[in-house]
Amino acid sequence: MSGSNPVKSLAAVASGARVANKFTPGSGLEANGVHAWFGKHHALADINLEFPANTVTALIGPSGCGKSTFLRTLNRMHEFIPGAAMAGEVLLDGRDIYEPGSDVTKIRLKIGMVFQKPNPFPSMTIGENVLSGLKLAQLKIENKDEILEECLTRAGLWKEVKDRLGAQGGSLSGGQQQRLCIARALAVSPEVLLMDEPCSALDPGSTLRIEETIRELADSIIVVIVTHNMQQAARVSDYTGFFLSDGGPGQLVEVATTNEIFSTPRDKRTEDYVTGRFG
Amino acid sequence: MTTTQSSYNGVVPKAREITTQPRFSDKVFRFVVTSGGFTSLIILSLIAVFLLLQGFPVLRDMGFGFITGFEWNPGDVDNGVPVQFGIGAMLIGTLLVSVIGLIIALPIAVGTALFLTYYAPEWIKKPLTITVDLMAAIPSVIYGLWGFFVLMPHAVYWAKLLHNYLGFLPFFKMPADVFERSPFIAGIVVGIMIIPIITAISREVFSQVPLDRIQAAYALGATKWTMIRSVVLPFGSSGVAGGAMLGLGRAMGETIAIYLVLNIYFAPNFQVLFSAGGNVASLIVSKFGEAGDYELRGLMAAGLILFIVTLLVNFLSNAIVKRTSRTGK
Amino acid sequence: MATIDYSSVKPQKPWRLDSKQLAINGGVFLLAVLLTPVVLNITPLNGKLGASFIFVVLATIGNTVLSIVRQGFKTISTSIAATFIYLATALVLLPLASVLFTVASKGITAVKLNTFTQDMRITNPDAPFTEGGALHAILGTFEIVLIATIICVPLGVLTALYLTEIKGRFENLVRFLVQAMSGVPSIVAGLFIYTVLIVTLGINYSGIAGAFALSILMLPTVARTSEEVLKLIPNDLREAGVALGATQWRTVAMVVVPAAKSGILTAVILGVSRVAGETAPLLLTILGNTTNNLNPFSGPIAALPLYTFSLMKTGLDVAISRAWGGALILLTLVLILFITARLLSGKKR
């Protein structure tokens, strides 16, 4: 858990404990020149970002800077908003997910998402919620008990719910519901997990539990997390990207290791933001 | 991954087209749901087409006289009595009964809606709202039965009073002393039947009045009534008008209850207390049983006219209600 | 630290009327009651109705005078308006209470055990109540309404799904047409089914024809209520389903509709209660019958509203009592449906 230290020491970075993963082209997730529009409104301009395997990347920035929009372009949830448009490309393992004729449901199976508010399916039990992704995507469920235990354990919820898998998902607390949603997203074994301010509706205790979960997940998958909370970005992420809009479309001002962003940012605006001078 | 700096130079590329190849199951799903969504269009068109096809011979033979004529006579070929179908008196009667119903229902419904939103104590609001909604659920045959056996004796008493004291008004005159089954009584029955409709819509609009405006009025020293007059009624007026039109549409299409309490008479009668009225829907019910083939076509043409008229009234009320909810004033 | 004793401070509501003012209000009310018979004697009005009318006028005058004394002349319109608004509410409740009371009191004499076990095949309409019954009409109503539900519910729910899930180009047109359809007079629906099934296709009067006519009247209720319910399902759930890699079809079938199922059930029950009492369309499509017809696909069939209507039209006293009995059974049925729907929708919110 060295990486979850609120303030990462320079030594830890230098020793390469967390930031060893270099991005290799052709694997992982990569955004090239991504723009996004809502109707005529140009919301996001020219975002270039690489997400190496087994890393957590935090996207920070003030409200309205386009970070959530960017997150939603990464698994094609963006297009659900009427009038949405985009440009550029998003590569998953070297293939453009916006390729004409690609099967969008398969893409979303590989790139999962956790939302701001916990949203377990109300008509299903805890167990059914975890397996719902497999059922919804019509995948075969072979060893259902194993999947249940594995996913709930990875989401840090197993101990709390193992005796009441048949209870309604809505009977859990807010933090537990959010971890249930993470377990649900993990059950389809995605390569990437996108998290859109997953803790903004939760209390500090639950937030800590989810942050631990995120750190553990980074051992096996790519996590991209949008957060308003700079301490959270510092605690959980390996890389941090700072988004800003100067009234026009949101742009990526700077991206670097989390350590650099919070200790020696290159851009004046990043420095102002992370030191709390605005935003 | 190296530290990168924003390289955005202001050149905006063209948006790409977002395309996807939906799964076959989704294509089927969207097709089935879309077709299902058009059920209402299909049914409405089929009603118009079939009634027009069936009624066309009569409409062609009678021409404009079908709407303006007052006589309904299937004719007698042997005795040289010509066939004559005209629903003018029925249309006038339908309108007359509906308007009487509206005159009775509107103030009562608006008053009840105001009571439910601003006067009633909190605990009584919900049960009372449900009770008023319940009125809309009572079958019209029961209203007809009640109207004939319970309301009619009372209504005749009121009608006599009106005739005695306001008889100088042209529409309260009586050609003969028969007060039963008059447009007045039918109007009261449909009025009661459309009260819940107008109340529900008025209540909906009144409850949408912005609270800050209400409080602003009170802060200026308004009493409850002056607040309602200066804030609630101007805000809700066109919504109430829409609800009234909707009620009018319902009243015009009402069949069984009116059939039981109204005496059908094939001449226009504006003396509302007198036992003679007209109603298109009741005409269809009363003539359907013994109608020959040609007369049946006449009834279908009458049904078509009724369909078109109620549709128009409904469109109008819809447009009025929509305009309020959009402008919000 | 010593705690301060606040027990001497009692909560008050200074905006309420005090007991003295309440007593005066009661006095005015009593005065109106006492004066009513006096005034009734000196005016040409008479009877219970005249008395109530005079009482309302006297009570209004009393209340107005009272508020003028208390708050001055400015409040005269406020007081009159309040009286009118209370009166309007009473005028709504009066006919409803009268309808319910009349149906219950007149209907109960005609409802005997045999009403639910026998039909009118061999019984004259004016035979004693211990003979014959409404079984054929009850069975007929159940058959017709059940088939109408089976026809209408899929179409109504599909319409609602089109409005909330597909949101196609014609969304507004479809919503408009559903609204327009709710205004179609019931007699026109009956006439339409008569022309299509009986005149054009040559099918005889039958339960199925009645069911088609009722499903036309039921569709807008089911579609609009279902739409309202589906709109309440948070969009998060749809996004969660799709983000898990599900197709839209699977998301709707496994997440959206199950989440809305009790609401959709409410919509169906409201639809049923809307049409269960319809008479006019049945008159033109099922014709009516005096005996049990368990085959809704063939031959005339009875239904409760039609049973009530045709017995009343005979004009015979006993038959009319039977009609009230039919009305009571019908009203009970509709009330049960109505209350069930309310309870279901109340539980949800």
Image (spheres, rainbow, N blue to C red):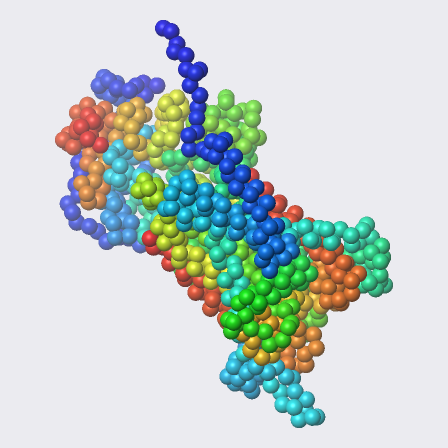
Between residues B41 and B17, which one lies in front from this camera angle? B41
Picture layout, residue A233 above or below residue B146? above
Relative image position of residue B125 (x, y in whole percent): 51, 42
For residue C184, which quarter of the picture? bottom right
Between B130 and A92, which is closer to the camera in this rendering? Answer: B130
Corner quadrant of residue A53: top left
Q: Is residue C183 left or right of residue C6?
A: right
Give me the residue at 69% from left, 53% from top: C102
Quarter of the figure with the N terminus of chain A: top left
Residue A236 in sight here: yes
Residue B222 sits above or below residue C23 on the image: below
Q: Is residue B46 visible?
A: no
Quadrant the C terminus of chain A occupies: top left
Q: Is the residue B194 above or below the residue C26 in the image?
A: below
For image coordinates 61% across by 74% down, the residue present is B276
How many numbered marks, from 0 up? Answer: 0
Quarter-of-image position of residue C187: bottom right
Seen from the viewer's position, the closer of residues A110 and C194 is C194
x%, y% of residue C7?
44, 15
- Image spot of residue A38 (x, y percent): 29, 49
Which residue lies at the image location 26% right of the left edge and 40% below the top edge? A64
Q: Position of residue C293 (x, y in %)?
A: 77, 61
Relative to A148, residue C175 above or below = below
B136 relative to A234 in the view: left or right: right
Q: Nearer the viewer, residue C62 or B274?
A: C62
What residue do we see at 52% from left, 34% from top? C23
